[in-house]
Image (cartoon, helix red, strand yellow):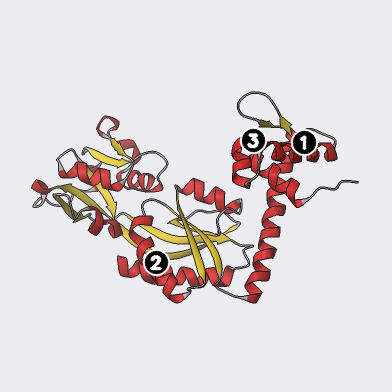
Amino acid sequence: MIMISMKHLRYFEAVARHGHFGRAAESCAISQPALSLQVKELEDILGSPLIERGGRRIRLTALGETFAARARDILRSVDELDELARLSRAPFTGSLRLGVIPTIAPYLLPAFVKALSERHPGIDLRPREAMTRTLVADLLDGRLDAAILALPISEPSLVEYPLFSEEFLLVRPMDADDDPAPTAGALSEMRLMLLEEGHCFRDQAIAYCGTPTIRSSGLIEGSSLSTLVQLVGVGIGVTLVPEMAVPIETRSASVSVVRLRDPKPTRTVGMIWRRTNPFADQLAEIAELARRVGEKAG
């Protein structure tokens, strides 16, 4: 009698996650026919279809949706058992899959990678830059070990470890260098440039200004802080930048930087990981190293 194997679970979970047999096969490093065969074998074992076939993108059946969620839980638990066994043999070795949001990665990662390699040379750091919602989803699904982003996340299954807080500074054209810092209300009436939808830093900036008062006709969006600062340099508008980014992003732009009035806009940068992660103590030590690096960067 054929029983459900870990291979069945991994291949089906990949199909459920990617919504596509070809991409799932590529992620599992096997051929598409081989993967399809394993998924069909799993359906035969269960005696019920997991996937609605037809069209360019596959859809899961009701059973498939439930089965995929359970499969992820099982695979995550098995991976954590493997990590626990490895950890007992050699702490602070192996890969560390670390996610970082784009408004932190370029300014913290270089110094952090250097400090981590010096302190724990056995760790193979594998950083990934992505927006908050993607990092949290990947962390919950076991595709990341930890992530550095803006707190709070407020997900009960995740540990939140605050690292440091930093201000948002106003970047404006050089000819405004002698002007007093604007209030939040005055800033909302300016031609404000912010990161595009999906960046948590954008939401934090809008919250400071007051969402109802921002003139939508004057709001300009960019895909990176670098783009926004360069646009300020040619006189298009003003923008807010986290303090750690200022030295790098303003070094080649003719801009003025000013601290805003109280209550100053700030964010708390932190590191998060799953509560069930067997590396919890080690991750806390790594987070403490990130805290020290971040405080120096600020």
Q: Which residue is at 62% across, 40% downward?
A: 24
Q: CA distance from mark 1 to mark 2?
A: 45 Å
**How far apart in space, not on screen, are marks 3 and 2 (Cα)?**
37 Å
Neighbor class of circle 2 (other Cα within 10 Å; few <14, some 14-19, many 20+) is many
Q: Which mark is residue 112?
A: 2
Depth check: give the residue in front, 262 or 73: 73
Task: Please tell me which of labels 1 and 2 falls first in the chain.
Answer: 1
The three-letter code of the residue at mark 3 reads: Phe
Q: Are marks 1 and 3 in contact (CB under 8 Å)?
A: no
Q: Residues within 10 Å of mark 1 (few under 14, many from 20)?
A: some
* Residue 158 image offset from top left, x and y in percent: 57, 58
> Which type of secondary structure does the marked residue at label 2 adopt?
helix
Q: Is residue 40 shown above or below 286?
A: above
Would residue 61 be seen by someone viewing this image from the given angle? no
The amino acid type found where label 2 is placed reads Phe
Question: Which residue is disc 3 drawn over?
Answer: 21
Q: Residue at x 72, y 32 (%)?
A: 51
Classify 10 Å Cα crowding around label 3: few (below 14), some (14-19), many (20 and above): many
Say above or below: 187 vs 244.
above
Q: Is residue 49 visible?
A: yes
The one nearer the camera, 192 or 130, is: 130
- Point out which mark residue 187 bears: none
Instruction: Give the image location of residue 231, x and y in percent.
Output: 20, 41
Q: Residue at x 63, y 23 (%)?
A: 55
Q: Amino acid at mark 1?
A: Lys
Q: Earlier in the sequence, mark 1 or mark 3?
A: 3
Viewer-nearest of labels 3 and 2? 3
Which residue is identified by label 1?
40
